[in-house]
Amino acid sequence: MVSSRQQPQHIYTVSNDERFILYGDSIIQQSFSPHTTFAFGAALANVYTRKLDVVNRGLWGYNTLQALRALSLSLPRPEDAQVKFLLLMFGAIDAMTPMTSGGVHQSVGVEEFQRNLRHMVCDPSVTAHGEDLHIIL
């Protein structure tokens, strides 16, 4: 029995199934690392504590074409979790000089880079999260 003098308990929500997805290359993959100068992924997780789950979907060594192919596997389905923010951060691998080690297979021209980003933004796995989704390029 609850006494009239007792204050009601506040129930803290651990997660409301809303996500901030960080999707990118090795820069994103390392965004929670304690071995970097500034771990911006960890800083975002701190800012959004109890509001959104910040999820690292960094793909070391991927260019935009490879990331476009993996996009639907990297995002939750809307019935499982609602993505509120999607950071797309690519370009380091795409910009590799074709004549460098790995560059011949990883280099992507500017036009293809732009096209791949547009396809990511319009991908059904992204648009399924509705108009409340904020995409950061």
Image (tube, helix red, strand yellow):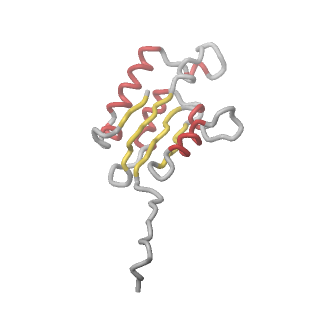
Does 67 appear above or below 101? below
Residue at far bottom of view: 1
Which residue is at 40% across, 50% downward? 18
Q: Residue at x 69, y 34 (%)?
A: 36
Percent of width and height locating residue 112: 42, 18
The reply, left or right, for residue 75 in relation to residue 95 is left
Tell me where residue 136 sits by quadrant: top left
Identify the residue at the far right of this view: 35
Residue 119 or 21: which is nearer the viewer?
21
Please determine whether, in this image, residue 13 is positioned above or below residue 69.
below
Specify the farthest residue to the left: 131
Q: Is residue 6 above or below residue 56?
A: below
Left/right of residue 97 with respect to residue 117 in the rendered view: right
Q: Whole-percent x and y of residue 25? A: 55, 31
**In x, y percent, where is residue 6?**
44, 76
- State which quarter of the image contains the C terminus: top left
Q: Position of residue 87 (x, y in %)?
A: 46, 34
37 or 21, which lies in front? 37
Instruction: Decide if residue 10 is on the left or right side of residue 128.
Output: right
